[in-house]
Image (cartoon, rainbow, N blue to C red):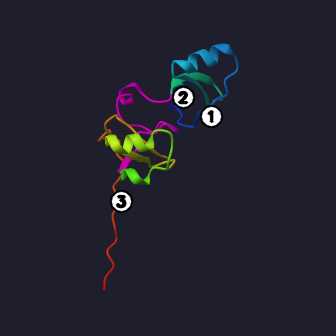
Amino acid sequence: MICPLCKSRECRRSRRRNLGDYALSLAGVLPWRCSTCQSRFYAHKIPFRLLLKAHCPRCGSPKVERIASDRVEEGNLVTLQRILGVPAYRCDPCRVKFYALRPQDRSARAPARRRVQKEA
């Protein structure tokens, strides 16, 4: 997140204060606070260009990588999603595992992990 006033990247989520903040959050617009200039502003957690791509449900990061579907922990619809073949992803920054029907964004893809081969 970038502050609209000072252009700093040191922004964090701010607490919702009133009914207006809660109403805006239903539409996906959340309150943010800049740690540099202490200004408070509203913005989406996920940029519009990434709304139709796979992103982390917790932090909103588009840096996700495909994983095997059996790596996702059990939940409400996990068995159904496995049967239907829904792709499973893992968020690189916060390490949460999830299913998403949206395709992966190739430009924001997390770097592939390479296996180290042991020499005999």
Q: Is residue 86 visible?
A: no
Q: Position of residue 60 (x, y in %)?
A: 47, 36
Q: Which mark is residue 118?
A: none
Q: Residues within 10 Å of mark 3 (few under 14, many from 20)?
A: few
Q: Position of residue 18 (x, y in %)?
A: 70, 16
Q: Residues within 10 Å of mark 1 (few under 14, many from 20)?
A: few
Magenta range: 45-66
Q: Are marks 1 and 3 in contact (CB under 8 Å)?
A: no
Q: What residue would you read off at disc 2?
A: 3
Q: What residue would you read off at disc 1?
A: 36
Q: What residue would you read off at disc 3?
A: 113
Among numbered discs 1 and 3, the one appearing first in the sequence: 1
* Residue furthest to the bottom: 120
- Residue 106 in which image quadrant: top left
Question: Which residue does the image show at 57% across and 17% down from the upper left?
Answer: 24
Q: In what element is the residue under mark 3?
A: loop
- Residue 62 in which image quadrant: top left
| Total marks placed | 3
